[in-house]
Amino acid sequence: MNYPISGQEVERTFGVGSSTPGPDHISSTLIDRADRFQMTRCLHFFFWNQAWLHGQFFQEWKREVRVVIPKPGKDDYHVCGAYRTISITSCLGKRFEKITSQRLSAILADVHFDPFQFAYLKNRSTTHALLIVTEKVKQGLIAGKKAGVVFFDFTDAFGRVDRKCLLYKIAKDFGITGKLFLHISSFLSERIARVKVNGHLGEWIESVFGTSAGTNLGPLLFIMYLHDIPQSIFPKFADGLVSISVNENLMCITSELQSAVDELVNWSHKWGMLLNVSKTKVTLFGNSSDDARATDE
């Protein structure tokens, strides 16, 4: 976890990732086409190991250009909710993150991280999450029961993460210490960002919340923040959360799902997340002869 960056780790960063240059205007193409021996030596000894040794993520690598992208299929593109942002950062920083995120992934695998989280982890995918939902509903219907499912959504999920709370969880819940902890702490601190819309750039401002979608470390840190969501909420795919209840009695389904909603609302209040009520839906599967109706929440 805390050993120096190896030459092999550096070599594996060549030829991967986006070629889009970050705010420092250094493109991955420039790095990849340079003399491989000299570039590897430079990155290994003079950049990444120096940063790692001192527990630093260089300030230039913490500058983000947040490109605004329209979400497909929206009815009204005059509202902010119809757009999302992707952070464009330094290629040198992102490739450094690739090494440290692989180390972090290995730690999560060793501790058998959250078996019901299927995003951003090796050998897990959205297909696995969907299969859990469909199989649980199908088995309930085969048994002559009904199934109620609540699909949750957070507002600006990545952007609302409280970084101090995240660091608390990383240390307390996962036991991450030493250089990796210092690296993550530095990665999250003193970040600045500006927005890019239709080729126009805004002013640089301090970024104090969030895990920065578009970085390599950000997604892993995000799911670590969500790891202690109530056990009644599963499966999970990043911030796409589901709660399922299967029962013969509609009132029991209603009670169980309401309990899951209450637990998640309490968790969200505690950790500063905000549920998107308009995108949170509930659906009932099964025989509706008893006047049961699926409703949206």
Image: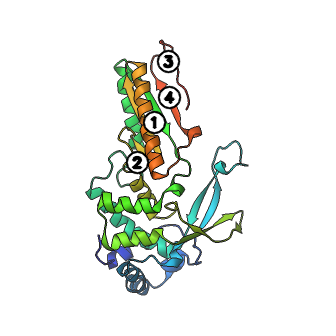
Residue visible at 38% across and 20% down?
Answer: 145
Tell which tag, 3 or 1, sits nearer the viewer: 1
Question: Callout 4 environment at 10 Å: few (<14), some (14 to 19), or many (20+)?
Answer: some
- Which residue is under mark 4? 283
Q: CA distance from mark 1 to mark 4?
A: 14 Å
Asked whether, in this view, residue 50 is left or right of residue 26, the answer is left
Q: Position of residue 278 (x, y in %)?
A: 59, 38
- Which residue is under mark 1? 261
Q: CA distance from mark 3 to mark 2?
A: 33 Å
Work out whether mark 2 precedes mark 1 in sequence or the reverse, and give the earlier one.
2
Residue visible at 36% across and 58% down?
Answer: 169
Work out whether mark 4 precedes mark 2 in sequence or the reverse, and give the earlier one.
2
Tell which tag, 1 or 4, sits nearer the viewer: 1
Q: Please, what secondary structure does the residue beneath circle 4 have?
A: strand
Q: Please, what secondary structure does the residue beneath circle 2 have?
A: loop
Q: Please, what secondary structure does the residue beneath circle 1 have?
A: helix
Q: Which of the pair 177/289 is nearer the observer?
A: 177
- Which residue is under mark 3? 292
From this view, report whether residue 174 is shown above or below residue 127: below
Asked whether, in this view, residue 277 is left or right of residue 242, the answer is right
Q: Name the quarter where the C terminus is drawn.
A: top right
Q: CA distance from mark 4 to mark 3?
A: 11 Å
Tell which tag, 2 or 1, sits nearer the viewer: 1
